[in-house]
Every structure is written in C-alpha cells, then in structure tokens.
Image (cartoon, rainbow, N blue to C red):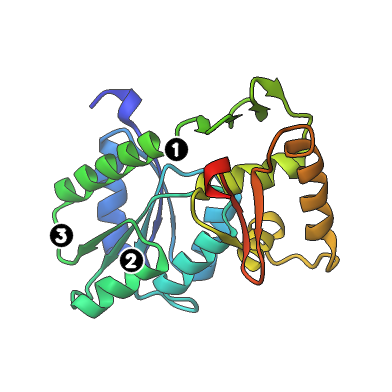
Amino acid sequence: MPRSNALQMLLIEDHLDIAKNIAEFMEQKNHVVDFATQGKQGLDLALQHYYDLIILDLNLPNMDGLEVCRHIRENADRHIPILMLTARDSIDDKVSGFQTGTDDYLTKPFSLQELEVRCLALSRRHLIDSKSILEIGGLKLDKKKRVAMREGQQLELSAMGFKILRILAEAYPQIVSRSELSHKLWHDEPTESDALRSHIYQLRTVLDKPFDFPLLKTVHGVGFTLALKEES
C-alpha cells in the first residue's frame, strides 16, 4: 500500500491479544497505531493528539466505549472518525452507538482485512467532508490559514472569534446549543458565565455590522446558527 494512504490511528481495546493482532496487521500496512487499554486513557489520548481515526471497543474498564465516544464528540475541536468495534451485535446496541456519535460499527469476530478497508473508507469519506475551505453564501473560511472573508473582505477576527465561526460553519445549517459551544471552546474548564456572550458580541461586531444583513443568528433558548438572508 502506498505510504500516502497510511493512517495515524488510536486503538482503544482492553483485550491485549486482539489489540496486538490489530496493531501488528495495521503496522505491516504502514499505518501508525497508538493504543490504550482503558476508556479514560483512550479519551485523554484522543483529546491530546492528532489521529486520522479511532478504533473503539465498547466494553472497556472505568469508562465504556459509548461514554468515551460521547466525551470525544463533546470535547474534541474537530470531528475524528470513530469505528466502534464490539461483540455486541444487537440492533439496539448499534443504534446506541450511532446516536452517541460513532461513524461505523464492526462486530467481533471480524476480518483484519475488512477492518482496514473500513478504516480507509472512513478516513477518505471524512477528508472529503472536511475540506479546508468552507463557503456559506458570501462567507468563506480557510481552516488551514485561519482566515475568514465575507463578500471578499477579510474579517479581523480574534482567535476565539474564528473558532466560534468555524464551529458554526461546520455545523451549518444546524443550530449549535450554548452548552455544546461552551464544551467545544473550553472543554470542562470553568469560565465566567458571560464569557460566551462577550465573544459572541465581538464576533457579531466583525462578522455582521459592516454588512447588509446579519449571518450570525441567535435562536433564543437554544443556541446559535448561521443563516443566509433568505433564511432570516
């Protein structure tokens, strides 16, 4: 397999024999594999390092796979593809996994070849979905350069303002709740109660005031979203 297809993976699996088999197979295919044997350990690695994909077992000590997946979705500053690997094969288990935020589901016993194919497909799909340039109406975000423009005019955003705008743009047209936005910005670290309000105000000042209509919309009692003129 060409090196360009190599993935940086995190494997969270408490059965050492299974973890060893997966790691050895993937490394033979030029992938790089980190692994954790406990849920909390895996969560910490997922939030501290960059991974193209996470292979996540469901039955884990001290924090199960569903809880790990939920925390990753709430606290990671980007979408990390997650493939849930488990012996639980009921429809209810699969529904719970997808509702929590997993991207794919593979039941044990499984083929290592199939696991790799699914990982590659999941990674490719994610790369297509996570283009570095986001365009919504007259708004254009370059995630790599951390530059935002509206109607061809560059916006002088703070680092926090750009982060908020990126979260809203990636979620568009969905509404991002206040609690979800706070989680993505500060994780579980305490912050002043009016901090989010202040950052939203500053973002509005740059994003909306110089232009004909506001893009940033407050959905009272729910959260925030971006809305084109015809949607307002």
Q: Can residue 151 be seen in this view?
A: yes
Q: Which residue is drawn at 13% across and 54% down?
A: 111
Left or right, 22 with respect to 216, comes to left
- Which label lies toward us, 3 or 2? 2
The residue where tag 2 is placed is 98
Residue under the image location 54 percent in, 69 percent down: 40
Dot placed on the residue nearer the N-terminal end, 1 or 3: 3
Q: Residues within 10 Å of mark 3 (few under 14, many from 20)?
A: few
Q: Are marks 3 and 2 in contact (CB under 8 Å)?
A: no
Q: Residues within 10 Å of mark 2 (few under 14, many from 20)?
A: some
Closer-to-camera residue (54/190): 190
Cα distance between the residues tagged 1 and 2: 19 Å
Query: What amino acid does circle 3 point to?
Result: Phe
Amino acid of disc 2? Phe
Q: What element carries label 2?
A: helix
- Measured as percent of width and height from the top left, residue 20 is found at 30, 55
User: Residue 91: x and y, percent?
Assistant: 19, 76
- What is the spatial separation of the Cα atoms under label 1 and label 3, in whole angstroms? 29 Å
The residue at the point 37 percent across, 41 percent down is 126
Residue type, mark 1 in image:
Ser
- Mark 3 highlights which residue? 110
- Mark yes or no: residue 7 visible: no
Answer with the quarter of the image where residue 180 lies: bottom right
Q: Looking at the image, which is closer to me, 165 or 77?
A: 165
Q: Which mark is residue 130?
A: 1
